[in-house]
Amino acid sequence: MKPVHWLLNNAPLVLFVVVFAIFGSLSPTFLELQNLSNILLQSSAMAIVATGMTFVLLTAGVDLSVGSVMFVAVAVAGKMIFQGSPLWVAFLAAIGVGVVAGAINAVFIIRLRIVAFIVTLAMLFVGRGFGLWLTNTRAMNMPEAVTQLGAAKLWGLPLPVIVFAVICLAAHLVLTRTPFGRQVYAVGQDADAARKAGLNVTGVLFAVYAIAGLCAAVSGLVSLTQTGAVSPSFGQQKEFNAIAAAVLGGVSLFGGRGSVLPGAVLGAVLIQTVENGLVILNANPYSYPLVTSAIIFVAVAIDSLRSRLLARLNRRRIYVDPGAAVE
Amino acid sequence: MPTDNKQPTTNNELLSFSGITKSFFGVAVLKDVSFIVPAGHTLGLVGENGAGKSTLMNILGGNLTPDDGQMSLGGEPHAPAAPKEATCAGVAFIHQELNLFPNLSIAENLFLAAFPRLGQKVVRGSPFVVCGSTDTTRVHQRTTNDEQRAVSRGLPWIDRRTLRSRTTELLRQVGLDHPPDTPVERLSAGERQLVEIAKALSIEPRLIILDEPTTSLTSRETEHLFALLNRLRERGIAMIYISHALNDVLRLCDSIVVLRDGAVVGQGPRAEWTVDRMITLMVGREMEQLFPHRPRSNLSPPSESTAAQVSASGAGSSDTLLEVAGVTQPGIVADISFGLRAGEVLGISGLMGSGRTELARILFGLDPLSRGSIHLAGRPIERLSPRERVAAGLAFLTESRRDEGLCLDASIADNLSLVSLPGHASGPAGWLNQGTMNASVQSARRAVTLNASARDLQPVKTLSGGNQQKVVLAKWLLNEPRVFILDEPTRGIDVGAKHEVYSLINQLVGRGAGVLMISSEIEELIGMCGRILVMNRGRIRDEIHLHQFDRERILKAALHDGHLAATAANPEAAR
């Protein structure tokens, strides 16, 4: 493979190494083990949402509602915990809420054939409104049992990191090793051709939105155990972080290309790494979004460059020059 | 007779069509088609664009159901309601445009709908027939021994080892030497074609339909493909081979069926056929009284520049409006040169995929060109954007008016004024002058005699195909262009609307415009044009003047391979 191709296909990894090298050379604390594990801990919630988002993006769709779904899910869980439900029941209920929200998105997109962008944008507002109504727009502080979960360790690893690892690994295996996963890629490449090939396209689409809802709920719960409170702005704008992480990790917005591992996970960790590094360097807090967005811009520019290049390589030829070699 | 196909027909008959009839919207596309495909034979199916080949194959493949008539396959009635059922019956369909997913690996493309799974129990042979449990009886019927049935579906987990070994085996059969994990996007067009055939083989087919399999292949890839097809024939797999490459059909097929206007007009074993006989049978339709009269300049080839005669309207002149010289875009079109005069309708004929549409897009500036020049009324335009070309007096009616030519949800008035909007804007803010705009919308509507019941604010999508096409034409009229490029201007519209479109074209050239008319319908070109260029594989193979118009000659230039076309381009040598 030519170096240009390699660079285009591995842009996220290259960016990651560059960012690491820059921060590492500027500050020795950055590379300490404690800080690195902090980065992982801080990126768990975002990586989990980004994982769900990856499924949707792979089918050339989008889910703008994940932030609101996170909010509704933890609002329901919080309510139940206050009313005395056991933690695990409340958590399962929250996950159920996430799946149902994703399923509602899917029904509107598949049955009524409304664009995913619009359906999930509506769900963004509906979910936020519903959550505010549930919580009376007041913050709920969780009992200590919840935050203890966030600080708990299993085999020496923080619980959120374990959840993060399990979800991402499971998603990775589903996408790469199951018939469903490979069909997700086919649907994203060309839904029409997938239908002709005999695939259950509506089933695949339904599943990816349900998975996005599920991941949003789990991410909300992870975040809840870390912050210990359900505030009215819980999960706000997380949909954009999730999309940014996935795209940064090389998931194409045009569908059919990308992965959870390294892909979206790398993207989520990269965003967190940048923020962490800027904090350590005592950078002006107002510069965070600027730096993050600059990195995302570079990643997206590379993605569209790659798509254009591929499109040119795949152009149909009408006649073949007898002497010309294959491009 | 066709109601009961149980009695064993001739021993070696695999597939039979009897009395297949199909119409779309009252237009008959297949009329009482009957023929048989013997087991293990390769049957060539030829005919012009629109002769009904694709429709017939779509019926066989389960994409369409016939209005009347029966098919039988291996002695069993064959009436697939969905592509999957045809697949289960052992019919594999390789479409002209490949249905591969470039982002997936070869192995994944082969087994996408039926991955081998861990824990899947199989009774002998492969478990990979796409049929669900309800169809197993059908599979059971068709294979005498070596049953292929998945007894249990297994876990939702791909059995990668089986996937690889099965793929390797199929790739070996088609002679493709790539690891199963290779992404399809790394393969050349010819290799992708082989993957399609491997996919067909994965269902253990009894019959493979190949629709124009060689259009994007190099000659070496074509040779490789033919060797493979011959091997498959030796294995007893029957094939229906559809192609416009008539020499290939002669070489490859055991027997040949010619379709014209939806009916079988000739069939027989290979020995009875020559390329010329096929062409003679493919053509030979009476010209209908479809084309409104217009005096056409009758140009004789040697003295082109002097012979441009003034047409009856008096607007014609010998001025060359559009001068195209040496236009080349590697892989798309090569060395295209011609001139289009005021008052002339110049036809471009050629098969689908011959580069006609691509040439039109290049002329209009939608696609790049690497060499050559385009002059519009003496002014070079090859570096201009499409918008600037419109301003310079070029108009382009696209092949698919639904996708490109019209905003379907917008009103008639909005669509009409789209092209000429800037002309009605005035002042620094560019406010639109509604008054003058409405006036010109009305005059354009009158010019195209749009259906009187249609209101200006009615969405265009509610109009019939013919009226939609008239809106597209009228839209461009508002801008008073000098040169019109019309790509398939009458595709899919009824005869009455066609007549009106033809009249409109006559009005345009009567007013001194030049029209470049691209069409698959040869009659239409013969009826309308003063000169016809024939394209084949990205080049102009022949130029035919009014007094020489001849369907056979056009078809020959469009169909024949390169070396034959070279003789056809030289008319004296060809006849």
Image: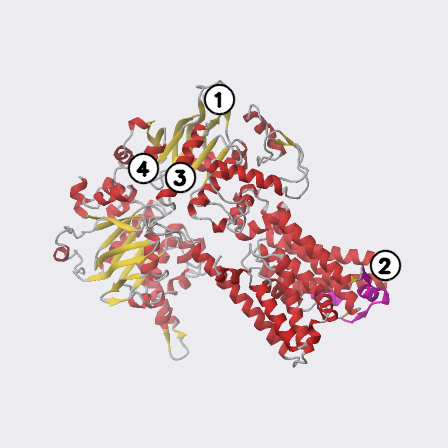
User: Where does the magenta region start and end?
Assistant: A128-154
Label 3: how many residues lie within 10 Å, few (<14), some (14-19) or many (20+)?
Answer: some
Residue that numbered label 4 is attached to? B246
Q: Do the residues labelled 2 and 1 touch (CB within 8 Å)?
A: no
Query: Which sits earlier in the primary sequence, circle 1 or circle 4?
Result: 1
The answer to whether marks 1 and 3 sit on the same chain is: yes
Q: Is residue A146 magenta?
A: yes
Q: Compared to A203, does A6 lie above or below?
A: below
Label 4: how many residues lie within 10 Å, few (<14), some (14-19) or many (20+)?
Answer: many
Q: Quadrant of residue B451?
A: bottom left
Q: Do the residues labelled 4 and 3 touch (CB within 8 Å)?
A: no
Q: Where is residue B242 in the image (x, y as percent from the top left)?
A: 38, 37
Q: Where is residue B403 in the image (x, y as percent from the top left)?
A: 43, 55
Residue that numbered label 3 is attached to? B224
Q: Position of residue A312 (x, y in %)?
A: 43, 57
Query: Real-space Cα distance between discs 1 and 3?
Result: 38 Å
Q: Tell me the kind of residue under disc 1.
A: Asn
Query: Real-space Cα distance between discs 4 and 2?
Result: 77 Å
Q: Which of marks 2 and 3 is in front?
A: 3
Disc 3 sits on a residue from what chain? B
Q: Which mark is residue A85?
A: 2
Q: Tell me the kind of residue under disc 4.
A: Leu
Left or right placement of residue A296 versus residue A161 in this view:
left
Q: Residue B5 carries which label?
A: 1
Q: Name the residue located 66 percent from the left edge and 50 percent from the top edge.
A: A174
The kind of secondary structure element at disc 4 is: helix
Q: Tell me the kind of residue under disc 3.
A: His
Is residue B62 visible to the viewer in this orientation of the structure?
A: no
Disc 4 sits on a residue from what chain? B
Q: Compared to B177, does B480 lie above or below?
A: below
Q: Which of marks 4 and 2 is in front?
A: 4
